[in-house]
Amino acid sequence: MASSVAQLEIRVARLERRADNQREDINVITSDLSKILDTQDQILKTQDLHSKSLEHHSQVLDNHTRILDDHTKTMNKHTRMFETLFEHFGIALPVEDNVSN
């Protein structure tokens, strides 16, 4: 009976050490997981910031494209007006200067 109790005490001690080791493992894993989740959160925030920045830049570029299109249409109208005026008054159109274009 005494040896059974001694064997049980040894077994309990061994199980307690194992439980302590598992608790320590869980603490380390939890800490590592927390660091991973924090890093992931920072990465997602950075990606979101870049995404918003890219979206804003796309909107600015779209707006600039519309402005340039409007300016091109206006310049084309003015060119036609000048061509018509020059033709009406018999003025020769100037030769294009390819160097400055």
Image (cartoon, rainbow, N blue to C red):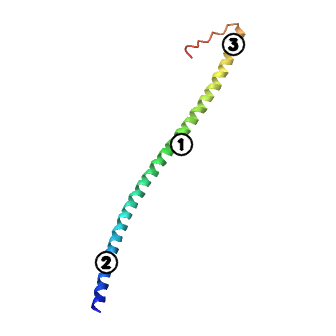
Which label sits on residue 85? 3
| Front residue (pair 60, 11) | 11
> Eyeballing the image, is 75 above or below 27?
above
Q: Quadrant of residue 10?
A: bottom left
Give the residue furthest to the right: 88
Q: Quadrant of residue 4?
A: bottom left
| Front residue (pair 2, 86) | 2
| CA–CA distance in space, label 1 to label 3 | 45 Å
Helix, strand or loop at disc 3?
Answer: helix
Residue 73 is left or right of residue 100, and the answer is: right
Residue at (58, 36) in percent of width and height:
62
Helix, strand or loop at disc 1?
Answer: helix
Q: Report which residue position mark 2 lands on.
A: 14
Give the residue furthest to the front: 3
Which label sits on residue 55? 1
> Eyeballing the image, is 86 above or below 22?
above
> Eyeballing the image, is 83 above or below 55?
above
Q: Position of residue 74 (x, y in %)?
A: 64, 24
Residue 1 is left or right of residue 68, and the answer is: left
| Front residue (pair 100, 89) | 100
